[in-house]
Image: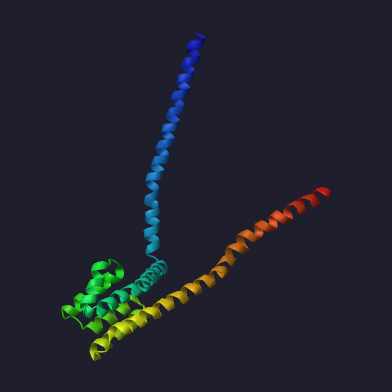
Amino acid sequence: MGAMEACLATAAAGSVFLGTMGLTSGHARRVRETTPGWMSGIAESAATIPVVRESRRRAELDRRRSACLRELPGLIDVLTLGLMAGLSFDASLELYLSRYDTELSAAFGEAMTSWRMGISGRGEALEALAGQMGVSALGSFASIVSQALEFGSPLADALEAQAQVIRDEQRSELEEEIERVPVKMLVPLGTLIVPAMLLAILGPLLSSSLGTV
């Protein structure tokens, strides 16, 4: 009987433990299921704040501007090769649009559609595109293309020179960003690393001095 009672007690304890674990896991599962809703609600509420909305808008504009600056030299190179091969500006631009699937190519595709449908002129569409992207180099590109096509000047040489100017600007911006890295590192260095080093150095000295008192 003693062995039988011990087995029954063990089985009962096991069932209680399993039931508790089931309740705990069920509660944890419910918490995991409800947490994303709370988080999404908080995110949606935060998105309605004007400061947050403006910050997101600026971040999106900066991202698009950086992507445009990275892709613009490639666009100019393709246009230059097409023009040197005897293609027209529109045909060279179509060559680029058929080879690349980026935000810049999509924007140029919309601009080309607008001037081909007669909604706006080529120069106006390119200037509107430059204003939409917020990139000064794209504005210079629009001016060079408009003037070259209007006066019949060689466009390939002008675009090749502009591509080199854009690459030089990107290199200078990258160098400036690298120079700002040490300044940005001062904040974590002063708030995290230096106090930890002082604690590691002065801690044993303080403990030893307090022990001798």
Residue 163 at what x, y percent from top left? Answer: 36, 78
Q: Is residue 194 left or right of residue 183?
A: right
Residue farthest to the front?
85
Residue 95 versus residue 125 in the image, above or below:
above
Residue 81 at what x, y percent from top left? Answer: 28, 76
Residue farthest to the bottom?
151
Q: Nearer the viewer, residue 140 or 54?
A: 140
Which residue is drawn at the image coordinates 65% and 56% (left, top)?
196
Q: Nearer the viewer, residue 182 or 162?
A: 162
Q: Is residue 188 left or right of residue 67?
A: right
Determine the image quadrant of residue 107.
bottom left
Residue farthest to the top?
1
Residue 57 versus residue 137 in the image, above or below:
above
**Applied colour scheme:** rainbow
Determine the image quadrant of residue 44.
bottom left
Q: Is residue 153 left or right of residue 30?
A: left
Residue 190 at what x, y percent from top left? Answer: 62, 64
The total of numbered circles placed on residues is 0
Residue 12 at what x, y percent from top left? Answer: 45, 21
Which residue is drawn at the image coordinates 24% and 86% (left, top)?
149
Q: Nearer the viewer, residue 179 or 207?
A: 179
Which residue is drawn at the image coordinates 50% and 11% (left, top)?
3
Residue 197 versus residue 20 in the image, above or below:
below
Which residue is drawn at the image coordinates 76% and 50% (left, top)?
207
Determine the image quadrant of residue 116.
bottom left
Q: Is residue 9 left or right of residue 144?
A: right
Residue farthest to the right?
213
